[in-house]
Amino acid sequence: MMWRPSLLLLLLLLRRGAQGKPSPDAVPHGQGRVHQATPLSEAPHDDAHGNFQYDHEAFLGREVAKEFDQLSPEESQARLGRIVDRMDRAGDGDGWVSLAELRAWIAHTQQRHIRDSVSAAWHTYDTDRDGRVGWEELRNATYGHYAPGEEFHDVEDAETYKKMLARDERRFRVADQDGDSMATREELTAFLHPEEFPHMRDIVIAETLEDLDKNKDGYVQVEEYIADLYSAEPGEEEPAWVQTERQQFRDFRDLNKDGRLDGSEVGYWVLPPSQDQPLVEANHLLQESDSDKDGRLSKAEILGNWNMFVGSQATNYGEDLTRHHDEL
């Protein structure tokens, strides 16, 4: 006998787009495979003109920055003070905010939406409510409970599902960094969003290779690359954009020009190197606030430059009135 997960459980399964078991075809295609770093903010970085919206969204995250916009200057500063304490506690707790602690905080805020999505579905996976998710819990929640020897006996493509299950288990083992077969929230987040974690890079590359490498030679040939983007109908002329993709493959994907992509080239494609945006912003905030130039920030230094970190609409409104009065 097999137990099927409830409708509510199915709706909460983050990684699966459809109800019921995950679709065997539920893999990204083409440009959907490429994981680009999301900008910290879409606002212009225009500190020179007193526009700190970019800094606010980088430091707080976009949604929380909107909340701070509604606060009085006093409340905004008070909340910033509590954030400073959290940044220090999360680091070495020495009473100062270092560059590393500031960078870690910015990276943390930028991943808030990911953590929130995992938290929303946590109880879907943590079925025994012990605060961790074991592999058995995750497997049963995703694929359903099967008696030993009856795995996927009731589905058409049982072998495909068995491969998917093995692939998920392999990814779980990589995400489970302490090897105890139990995932913490951080480890489950790495399983669900591997592209966000450096230690999951190899598994993202391996899964991409497996998806595209149809002849199983360990490489992605140009035809395999194109097949992931486009499936021609009999007699159909290949569109111009496909020819452009072939050229992209030759010019930008195949770095060593051997006519195929190896694992390192696949990694460069799907997880392209990018600027460490949290570090750049952390450096900027530190340089602008480090009044004694000792390479670290005291709570007083951060609060002294609080408008760059968090600000508030009340402050901006007051500044607008002052500017208007001066113009008159």
Image: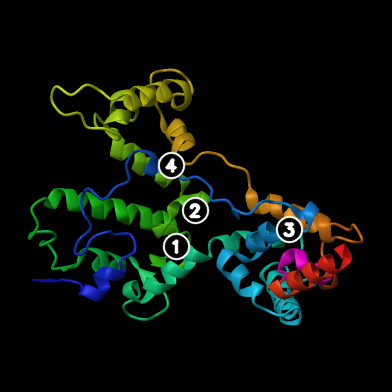
Of tags 3 and 4, the one toward the viewer is 3
Q: Is residue 179 above or below residue 312?
A: above
- For mark 4, does the 10 Å Cα neighbourhood hold few (<14), some (14 to 19), or many (20 or more) residues? some
Residue occupied by mark 4:
34
Q: Amino acid at mark 2?
A: Glu
Cβ–Cβ below 8 Å for labels 4 and 1?
Answer: no
Q: Nearer the viewer, mark 2 or mark 3?
A: 3
Q: Are marks 1 and 2 in contact (CB under 8 Å)?
A: yes
* Range covered by the magenta-colored residues: 303-311
Looking at marks 3 and 4 on the same chain, the residue that comes earlier in the sequence is marked by: 4
12 vs 199, left or right, is left
Residue 323 among magenta residues: no
The answer for how far apart the CA atoms under marks 2 and 3 are is 30 Å
Q: Amino acid at mark 4?
A: Val
Q: Say above or below: 87 vs 129.
A: above
Residue under label 3: 51
The quarter of the rendered structure image containing the C terminus is: bottom right
For the residues marked 4 and 2, what is the alpha-carbon distance in whole angstroms?
12 Å
